[in-house]
Image: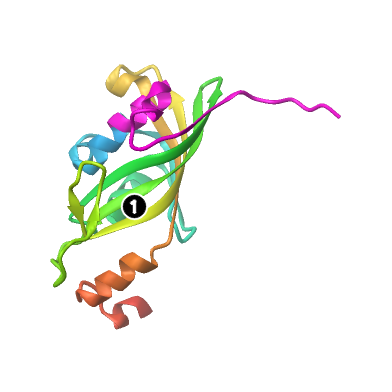
């Protein structure tokens, strides 16, 4: 039996080199750099996401509506002093009005309080980090009429990651206390 298929862009990569060959991933690199540097945090949310933007957290909690979802995403990342994303595998589907993609990568983070041990996790550029968390990301990008940020916006972002190692390190450094977790 035959069935319809859709062409996709798939690449295994070490960093952005192979991934950026696709225009959506080239934009994602720009977006990720602006996010990790916190540059995008000081611009209007509409520069990066749609008014109907949805953010789905690793625990499944769903935040909807442009600005509230953008703020929820910033709040989750505000727990980190610094962050850096490096892709390792992506699959991009071209759609009529944009793209959808899933990707695997490593999220490097530094926590706000220094640990007692020396950092042993390094990104591809050799920079040390507190943690490197294997993660998966799913995005839906749409093309817009705007000239800002190449006329692309994020409509949906879902983040898949085990927050256990991050939480354990935060407990160890007394950034959070066990009673904080109980509500």
Q: Position of residue 36 (x, y in %)?
A: 23, 43
Q: Is residue 91 above or below residue 158?
A: above
Magenta segment boundaries in residue numbering: 1-30
Q: Residue 79 lies in magenta, yes or no?
A: no
- The residue furthest bottom is 179
Q: Quadrant of residue 57?
A: bottom left
Q: Is residue 131 above or below residue 74?
A: below
Q: Quadrant of residue 113?
A: bottom left
- Whether residue 158 can be seen here: no
- The quadrant in which the C terminus is found is bottom left
**Residue at image coords 56%, 20%:** 96
Q: Which residue is mark 1?
A: 72
Q: Nearer the viewer, residue 94 or 56?
A: 94
Q: Position of residue 132 (x, y in %)?
A: 31, 55
Q: Nearer the viewer, residue 176 or 5?
A: 5
Q: Is residue 125 above or below residue 159?
A: above
- Whether residue 154 can be seen here: yes
Q: Quadrant of residue 137?
A: top left
Q: Secondary structure at mark 1?
A: helix
């Amino acid at each position: 039996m035959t069935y319809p298929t859709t062409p996709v862009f798939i690449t295994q990569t070490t960093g952005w080199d192979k991934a950026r060959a696709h225009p959506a991933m080239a934009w994602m690199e720009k977006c990720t750099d602006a996010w990790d540097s916190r540059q995008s945090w000081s611009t209007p949310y509409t520069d990066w996401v749609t008014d109907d933007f949805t953010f789905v957290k690793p625990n499944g909690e769903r935040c909807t509506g442009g600005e509230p979802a953008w703020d929820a995403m910033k709040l989750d990342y505000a727990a980190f002093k610094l962050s850096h994303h490096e892709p390792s595998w992506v699959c991009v589907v071209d759609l009529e009005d944009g793209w959808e993609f899933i990707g695997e990568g490593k999220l490097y983070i530094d926590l706000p309080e220094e640990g007692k041990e020396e950092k042993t996790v390094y990104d591809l550029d050799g920079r040390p980090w507190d943690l490197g968390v294997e993660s998966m990301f799913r995005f839906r990008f749409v093309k817009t009429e705007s000239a800002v940020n190449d006329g692309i916006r994020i409509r949906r972002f879902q983040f898949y990651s085990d927050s256990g190692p991050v939480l354990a390190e935060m407990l160890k450094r007394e950034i959070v206390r066990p009673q904080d977790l109980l509500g």
